[in-house]
Image (spheres, rainbow, N blue to C red):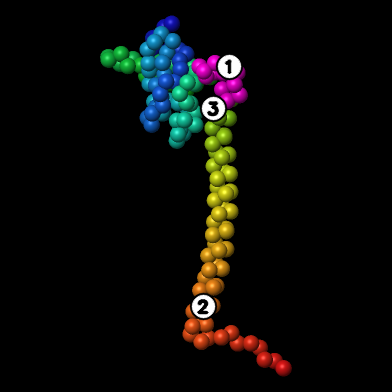
Amino acid sequence: METDVGSIVEGVVVEVVKYGAFVKMRNGRTGLVHISQISNEFVREITDHISPGTRVMAKIVSIDDRGRVQLSLKNVPQDGLSESGGQEGAADDSRSGAARRATPRYQDAREEDSFEKKLKMFMRQSEDRMVDIKRNIESKRGIKKKKNKNK
């Protein structure tokens, strides 16, 4: 398998770090996919796009003097690849990157809904407590509610 600059190679993600992912190519060499080279879209969490054990197709961007390989996943089709754990054709692997990223966003929406519910419940309880405190203070001051005596 060629390891020339510009060639497309297949590899397995061996480690994910905050600045990118290390991919071990079939020829045994390991290269780095920088976070900016993972997707054409903004990448907040690398694990939303790839995880250890994921098979990827990557383009060799550069090889420096020390033999370090820089890889890119941008504009390289990832169809038909599966995790190296032998789970051929698993549903998670056949999805495109956009579909894979949709799941966490959906989960965030559910968390936001539960947050809204918790906030609403907190506000209701807080208001009830404030009414109780106000009544307690008024009773200690001797202030009573005036009743309408329209007889």
What residue is disc 3 on? 97
- Name the amino acid type tagged 2: Asn
Position of residue 23 relative to residue 18, above or below, is above
Nearest the camera: 138 or 43? Answer: 138
Position of the N terminus by quadrant: top left
Image x and y of residue 120, in percent: 57, 58
User: How far separated are the C-alphas under marks 2 and 3?
Assistant: 59 Å
Quick one: label 2 or label 3, which is nearer the N terminus? 3
Residue 40 in view of the camera: no
Q: Are marks 1 and 3 in contact (CB under 8 Å)?
A: no
What residue is disc 1 on? 88
Residue 42 in view of the camera: yes
Tell me, yes or no, whether the highlighted magenta stretch contains residue 91.
yes
User: How far separated are the C-alphas under marks 1 and 3?
Assistant: 18 Å
Nearest the camera: 96 or 139? Answer: 139
Q: Nearer the viewer, mark 1 or mark 3?
A: 1
- At horizontal 48% and vertical 26% (from top left) the residue drawn is 50
Quick one: label 2 or label 1, which is nearer the N terminus? 1
Q: Are marks 2 and 1 in contact (CB under 8 Å)?
A: no
| Marker count (numbered) | 3
Q: Is residue 15 left or right of residue 110?
A: left
Q: Quadrant of residue 89?
A: top right
Q: Main secondary structure of the magenta part?
A: loop
Which span is picked out in magenta? Answer: 79-94
Q: Which mark is residue 136?
A: 2
Nearest the camera: 84 or 57? Answer: 84
- Name the amino acid type tagged 1: Glu
Q: Residues within 10 Å of mark 2 (few under 14, many from 20)?
A: few
- At horizontal 54% and vertical 73% (from top left) the residue drawn is 132
- Name the amino acid type tagged 3: Gly
